[in-house]
Image: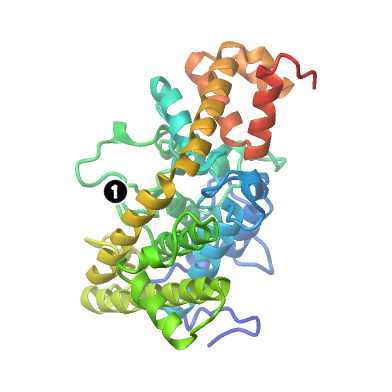
């Protein structure tokens, strides 16, 4: 049964859900809260982190000054969390862990979205590369400097596992340890996250929720930015038929309402597909514990084959008509140059870094210094990166 605050009680949680009372704990042992489960506490630490606040001014697709109504990493993360919590509740999983992972999943993103990541990854190639999932793990285990007794947020093993491998095992399908993102490999040496296995179902829920939110809301933003029209979507599976239904049911409805009605029906269709397919896979595999989930041969939370095909078709449309639209290309071209310029200058001239960063950089070898500079740049918001570039490269700027 549900507790008075709406949370699923231990007796109502299915046996293969992650159980906060049986958590593997934290790397640094702490006195736990008397009023919150360990996963609720993880979620709260993520929400109160500096990295989470910075998502407010980090790009989803559009650069920060393009408009106030487009998604940022923060609004996207909140939307992912809402979907994840709903799915987890329906499947009788631990909602708080699913929500924590949804809220954390984008913490490692650079400014300027994928353009920033591409530039930083290229710059960091001689030093082990850069990967936003690995950076998320680095942030929550190292970079956040808030607590008196430890670096990072000291999250539970289950949350860290979900952060590292929510998209699936990292050491399967021919992957070798030396192919891991360096931040993941480095942390795993001191705290084994069992990278060869699947994560718990809550992490799988968060990953699918990200997919659902990403597609539907990028479609929304692209339509509102007039990068394409509703008519352009007529032949796109899933989306086209929904638009036709909405227009048929509400002739003459204003564009904004048609878009919103289409997006909410898309989300509903994808969520219901996930629930149906997941229940089928659960019945087929019959897991009795979260360890059975981790030992499984495939993900248990998934789209059906038919929905996967529709998902790929929508992604293909968005790639061609939105992510590679000339207006977006112009923004991303500038963004890549900003990140590349900042990295090159700060690596060569660490005395341009703020004092605390400079002291660490000057004491480090070249690889450690590069990773420190990458940490500094990855933590920037779009606005700060833009302003920092102006301060460092505009000869007439005296700020």
Q: Is residue 35 left or right of residue 59?
A: right
Residue at 55% x, 21% y: name it. 341
Q: Secondary structure at mark 1?
A: loop
Structure colour scheme: rainbow
Q: How many marks?
A: 1
Rendered location of residue 56, percent (x, y): 65, 50
User: Would you name the residue on which mark 1 appears?
Assistant: 196
What residue is rendered at 54% in x and 72% in y?
Answer: 255
Depth order, front residue of 63/382: 63
Check the image and report above or below for 262 versus 174: below
Q: Quadrant of residue 68?
A: bottom right
Q: Residue at x 67, y 38 (%)?
A: 383
Give the residue at the far right of this rendering.
399
- Answer whether residue 51 is visible to the viewer in this image: no
**The C terminus appears in which quarter of the rendering?**
top right
Q: Position of residue 181 (x, y in %)?
A: 39, 36
Which residue is at a point 33% across and 72% down the rendered structure image? Answer: 238
Residue furthest toward the front? 252
The answer to whether residue 272 is above or below residue 387 is below
Left or right, 129 with reference to 66: left
Classify 10 Å Cα crowding around label 1: few (below 14), some (14-19), many (20 and above).
some
Residue 150, given in percent of the width and then of the height, sits at 64, 40
Residue 136 seen from this side: yes
- Taking depth in this image into account, of 53 and 32 the one nearest to the observer is 53
Which quadrant of the view contains residue 375? Answer: top right
Q: Position of residue 324 (x, y in %)?
A: 40, 44
């Amino acid at each position: 049964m549900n507790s008075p605050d709406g949370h699923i009680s231990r007796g109502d949680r299915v046996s293969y859900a992650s159980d906060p009372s049986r958590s593997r704990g934290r790397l640094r042992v702490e006195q736990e809260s008397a009023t919150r489960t360990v996963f609720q506490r993880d979620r709260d630490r993520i929400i109160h982190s500096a990295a989470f606040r910075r998502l407010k001014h980090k790009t989803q697709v559009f650069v920060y000054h393009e408009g106030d109504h487009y998604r940022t990493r923060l609004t996207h993360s909140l939307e992912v969390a809402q979907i994840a919590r709903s799915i987890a509740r329906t499947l009788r999983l631990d909602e708080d862990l699913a929500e924590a992972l949804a809220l954390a999943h984008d913490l490692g993103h650079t400014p300027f979205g994928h353009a920033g990541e591409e530039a930083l990854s290229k710059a960091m190639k001689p030093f082990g590369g850069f990967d936003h999932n690995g950076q998320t793990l680095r942030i929550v285990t190292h970079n956040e400097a808030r607590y008196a007794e430890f670096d990072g947020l000291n999250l539970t093993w289950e949350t860290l596992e979900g952060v590292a491998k929510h998209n699936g095992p990292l050491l399967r399908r021919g992957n070798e340890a030396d192919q891991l993102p360096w931040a993941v490999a480095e942390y795993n040496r001191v705290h084994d996250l069992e990278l060869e296995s699947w994560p718990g179902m809550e992490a799988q829920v968060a990953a699918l929720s990200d997919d659902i939110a990403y597609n539907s809301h990028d479609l929304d933003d692209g339509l509102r930015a007039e990068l394409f029209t509703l008519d352009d979507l007529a032949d796109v599976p899933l989306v086209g038929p929904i638009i036709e239904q909405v227009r048929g049911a509400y002739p003459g409805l204003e564009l904004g309402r048609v878009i919103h009605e289409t997006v909410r029906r898309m989300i509903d269709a994808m969520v219901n597909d996930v629930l149906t397919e997941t229940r089928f896979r659960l019945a087929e595999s019959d897991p009795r514990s979260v360890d059975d989930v981790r030992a499984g041969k495939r993900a248990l939370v998934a789209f059906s084959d038919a929905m996967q095909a529709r998902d790929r078709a929508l992604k293909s449309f968005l790639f061609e008509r939105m992510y590679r639209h000339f207006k977006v290309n112009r923004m991303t071209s500038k963004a890549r140059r900003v990140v590349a310029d900042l990295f090159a200058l700060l690596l060569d001239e660490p005395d341009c870094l703020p004092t605390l960063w400079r002291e660490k950089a000057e004491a480090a070898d070249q690889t450690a210094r590069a990773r420190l500079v990458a940490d500094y740049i990855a933590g920037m918001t779009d606005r700060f990166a833009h302003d920092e570039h102006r301060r460092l490269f505009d000869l007439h700027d005296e700020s």
